[in-house]
Image (cartoon, coloured by chain):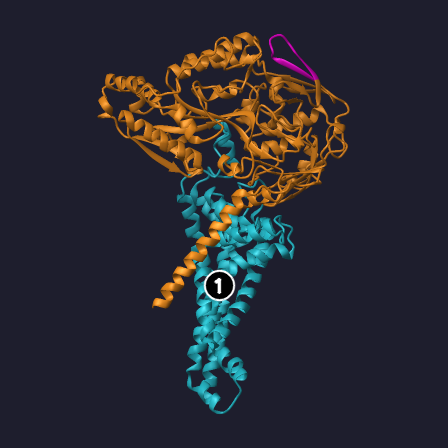
């Protein structure tokens, strides 16, 4: 157990170093400049800009500086948003993406598991839900977002169109973002419930005359939830990063936008900072979920052996 | 198996019906407008790099700044200068020394008086190499400005002298006829150095340090959400301001902007939607601020060394067809400087309509002559002519233009390969000279005719045609320095003629600035540098 934890932590440090290095050189390869050339009329201006942002320094110097920045968690200032530090960008925009992500995860987990349980019990519902699943998987996020916004904001005027950071602003994006995870979780839950249902210990419990609800919640769900949990790691990472499309349609000032716009503009500090931030988030969340599943499975094994 | 097939069909039908209903509903509707008479909600920009006179770029952010700051003079939609912070100016006959008299009642939004020192601070800051302002070269008219910006002189050497709090004396590097006009644009705004020094990095983002001297001041800047301006009660002419708030909403998504306009959340949309997208919502309005789209030959390339090839390409294009293909609001450009860009102050006529103006191309193509020229150059029907590398960015209208140019040039046997790259990469590729033909969108950033002409000067950084003509350079230098209006316009015509008869560029079309707005909103102006000013705006 301790060995696993230490091994995990070590692998986090090593992966971050590699992610950093690879990202740095990838940005270096992207053609184009980090500043807008369209207003520049004199060579002197280019020189001044390169001097200001240390773009004229050799690559080795910048690489070492970047590693140092990573170590001190100070990534410097953005080129594109004059004067804003990367840390303040993360501090300002991550909570919004995270809040939306967390709401979406909770919402899709609850709804997904409920749909999963219900569909596993009634054959007809399973067929009906299949239609819903196909629609939800095949409609791209941005279309769903546009449809929801058009009918609920513009036509019926239920939700506000302007961002005010109140709960009403989160509902439509949350529904949009959860459309896919819900289906996935529901499917996963349904299948694993059916699988567990066939197992001997469930049969034994039924034979003992334990009522259906207890069997479902105490035996079946507990065992079938593992596969859903391990999928959670991926969704967390996906949702916390924020979705560029959904964020821009609903005008949510989240972080998703920064990834796309700033990579395009070769904004080193922001891209490096965000990549590192998210790698840590992704690695740690996957690692934690792994750990939870590991602990749970080990308990389960002991339990099974005892039985 | 069969059941699931039926299921799929039902689903597909459902999706199509929903999509159909969705799109028919949205194209019909024109929503209710806001009843709020004190606030204007504007969608003009989505990405704001700074609200700093030295560092803000692009015309949309310039518009926001022009509502917040005021230079020595203001410029109106006709190109006339009106008093701003300065009430009057004198210059010597040689136009080398300008003396500006500042009004004593001009105040910053925190109540402090606007002094000549504030202007000196602002200008010095733009020129300071450490600021690395892209605007610095727009101040090179001032004595020693270029040297200071290049690190070859110190700030004390600059020709900016504060005689007293309300008198500013500026010495020019060379005679400059239009320096008073130049003081209307963004890099010439005054700044509050004491506030900037409080928070060097983020002073422009907080209302406590973003102190401005214009009609409106910053109330709040929520990143990626909005920039809220409120009326500046300390503005010297504040009874002229009828609107209390302006919200610049930083929407980037087209659907969102359209939905917001339909619900009446937005009163004004400019730049953030294309003409086609605007047309679905409202009747498009046009402002007299022309924007030209041209092609530039890379004269360093062997294929374009022969002027006959360049002329053939110019003749093979049907400009009328291109303009109509680009949609409403686009007109064929038959010379280089577009109509309504500059007024000939000497004859008081538009530059394109004065006595010296003429068209260099016709609307229709002259295929026969083009073919003839190609034949003379040794490329009969385009045989032996290498494929032309046409560099453009990925913006919709540029790609569309590229396609039609390619199509038209194929009629004389010229093969074009379109190389469309992301904006940033395209700019780098272009400054490395890796192209034969490139698109250029051009709008004037300062109110002088030289703003259209500088990019053909031999050593100018934006001379993408790599045009090198000592005759042109001499004429350009004279246009800048002459103190005679008549001579200036004659020279400008001459400069245009040199560019066009040397077939340096391919003029394609020009378009006016388009926008949609609440019909009750009146009184705003688009000045001659394209800035949208709400100082006199009101609701009817």
Residue closer to the observer: B450 or B44:
B44
Q: Quadrant of residue B148?
A: top right
In the rendered structure, the answer to whether residue A44 lies left or right of residue B114 reads left
Q: Quadrant of residue B88?
A: top right
In the rendered structure, the answer to whether residue B201 lies left or right of residue B456 reads right
Q: Is residue B87 visible?
A: yes
Q: Residue furthest bottom?
A: A208
Q: How many marks?
A: 1
Write the start and end of the magenta stretch as one range.
B88-100
In the rendered image, residue B60, in percent from the top left (x then y), is placed at 57, 34
Q: Chain of mark 1?
A: A
In the rendered image, residue A59, in percent from the top left (x then y), is placed at 43, 43
Q: Residue at x 50, y 15 (%)?
A: B352
Whether residue B191 appears in magenta in the rendering, the answer is no
Mark 1 closeness class: few <14, some 14–19, many ≥20 residues within 10 Å: many
Q: Residue at x 42, y 39 (%)?
A: B422
Q: Is residue A4 visible?
A: no
Q: Is residue B103 above or below residue B272?
A: above
The colour with which the image depicts chain A is: cyan
In the rendered image, residue B270, in percent from the top left (x then y), is placed at 56, 35
Q: Is residue B389 above or below residue A254?
A: above
What is the secondary structure assignment of the residue under circle 1? helix
Residue closer to the observer: A59 or B68:
B68
Residue closer to the observer: B145 or A263:
A263
Question: Please, what is the dominant secondary structure of the magenta stretch?
Answer: strand
Q: Is residue B195 above or below residue B154?
A: below
Q: Which residue is mark 1?
A: A181
The colour with which the image depicts chain B is: orange
Q: Is residue B266 above or below residue B438?
A: below
In the rendered image, residue A141, in percent from the top left (x then y), is placed at 48, 54
Residue closer to the observer: B146 or B235:
B235
């Amino acid at each position: 157990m301790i060995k696993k934890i230490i091994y995990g932590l070590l692998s986090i440090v090593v992966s971050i170093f590699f992610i950093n290095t690879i990202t740095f050189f990838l940005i270096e390869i992207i053609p184009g400049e980090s500043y807008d050339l369209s207003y520049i009329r004199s060579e002197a201006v280019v020189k001044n800009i390169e001097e200001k942002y240390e773009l004229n320094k050799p690559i080795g110097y910048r690489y070492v500086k970047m590693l140092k920045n990573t170590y001190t968690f100070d990534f410097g200032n953005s080129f594109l948003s004059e004067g804003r530090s990367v840390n303040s960008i993360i501090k300002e925009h991550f909570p919004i993406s995270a809040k939306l992500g967390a709401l979406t995860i909770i919402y899709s987990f609850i709804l997904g598991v409920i749909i999963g349980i219900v569909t596993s019990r009634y054959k007809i519902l399973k067929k009906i839900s299949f239609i819903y699943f196909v629609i939800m998987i095949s409609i791209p996020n941005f279309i769903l977002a546009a449809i929801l916004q058009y009918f609920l904001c513009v036509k019926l005027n239920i939700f506000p169109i302007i961002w005010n950071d109140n709960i009403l602003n989160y509902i439509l994006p949350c529904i949009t973002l959860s459309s896919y995870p819900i289906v996935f979780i529901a499917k996963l839950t349904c299948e694993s419930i059916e699988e567990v249902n066939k197992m001997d210990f469930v049969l034994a419990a039924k034979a003992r005359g334990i009522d259906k609800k207890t069997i479902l919640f105490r035996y079946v769900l507990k065992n079938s939830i593992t596969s859903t949990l391990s999928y959670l790691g991926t969704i967390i990472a996906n949702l916390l990063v924020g979705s560029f499309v959904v964020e821009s349609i609903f005008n949510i000032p989240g972080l998703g936008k920064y990834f796309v716009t700033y990579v395009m503009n070769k904004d080193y500090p922001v891209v490096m900072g965000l990549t590192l931030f998210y790698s840590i988030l992704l690695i740690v969340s996957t690692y934690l979920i792994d750990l939870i599943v590991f602990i749970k499975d080990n308990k389960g094994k002991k339990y099974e052996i005892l039985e | 198996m069969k059941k699931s097939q039926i299921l799929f069909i039902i689903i597909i039908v459902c999706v199509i019906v929903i999509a159909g209903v969705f799109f028919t509903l949205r194209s019909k509707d024109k929503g209710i407008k806001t009843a709020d008479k004190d606030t204007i909600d504007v969608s003009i920009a989505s990405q704001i790099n700074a609200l700093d006179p030295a560092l803000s770029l692009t015309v949309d952010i310039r518009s926001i700044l022009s509502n917040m700051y005021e230079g020595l003079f203001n410029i109106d939609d006709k190109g006339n200068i009106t008093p701003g912070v300065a009430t009057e100016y004198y210059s010597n006959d040689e136009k080398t020394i300008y003396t500006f008299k500042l009004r004593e009642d001009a105040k910053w939004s925190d109540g402090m008086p606007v002094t000549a020192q504030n202007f000196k601070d602002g200008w010095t800051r733009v020129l300071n190499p450490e600021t690395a302002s892209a605007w610095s070269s727009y101040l090179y008219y001032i004595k020693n400005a270029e040297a200071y910006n290049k690190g070859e002189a110190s700030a004390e050497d600059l020709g900016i002298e504060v005689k007293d709090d309300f008198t500013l004396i500026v010495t020019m590097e060379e005679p400059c006829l239009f320096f008073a006009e130049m003081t209307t644009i963004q890099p010439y705004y005054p700044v509050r150095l004491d506030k900037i020094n409080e928070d060097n990095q983020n002073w422009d983002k907080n209302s406590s340090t973003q102190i401005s001297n214009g009609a409106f001041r910053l109330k709040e800047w929520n990143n990626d959400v909005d920039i809220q301006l409120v009326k500046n009660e300390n503005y010297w002419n504040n009874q002229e301001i009828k609107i209390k708030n302006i919200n610049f909403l930083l929407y980037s998504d087209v659907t969102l902007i359209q939905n917001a306009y339909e619900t009446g959340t937005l009163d004004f949309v400019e730049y953030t939607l294309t003409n086609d997208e605007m047309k679905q919502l409202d009747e498009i309005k046009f402002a007299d601020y022309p924007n030209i789209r041209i092609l530039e030959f890379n004269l360093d390339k062997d294929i374009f060394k022969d002027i006959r090839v360049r002329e053939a390409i110019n003749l093979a294009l049907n400009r009328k067809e291109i303009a109509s293909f680009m949609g409403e609001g686009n007109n064929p450009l038959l010379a280089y400087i577009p109509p309504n860009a500059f007024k000939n102050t000497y004859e008081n006529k538009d530059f394109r309509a004065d006595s010296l103006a003429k068209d260099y191309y016709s609307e229709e193509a002259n295929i026969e002559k083009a073919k003839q020229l190609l034949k003379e150059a040794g490329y009969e029907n385009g045989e032996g002519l290498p494929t032309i590398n046409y560099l453009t960015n990925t913006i919709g209208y540029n790609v569309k233009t590229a396609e039609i140019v390619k199509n038209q040039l194929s009629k004389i046997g010229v093969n074009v390969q379109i190389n469309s790259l992301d904006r940033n990469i395209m700019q780098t590729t272009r400054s490395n000279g890796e192209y034969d033909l490139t698109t250029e969108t051009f709008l004037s950033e300062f109110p002088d005719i030289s703003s259209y002409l500088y990019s053909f000067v031999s050593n100018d950084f934006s001379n993408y045609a790599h045009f090198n003509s000592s005759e042109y350079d001499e004429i350009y230098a004279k246009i800048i320095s002459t103190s005679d209006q008549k001579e200036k316009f004659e020279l400008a015509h001459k400069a245009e003629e040199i560019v066009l008869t040397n077939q340096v560029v391919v003029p394609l079309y020009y378009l006016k600035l388009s926008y949609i707005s609440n019909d009750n909103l009146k009184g705003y102006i688009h000045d001659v540098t394209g800035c949208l000013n709400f100082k006199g705006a009101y609701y009817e």
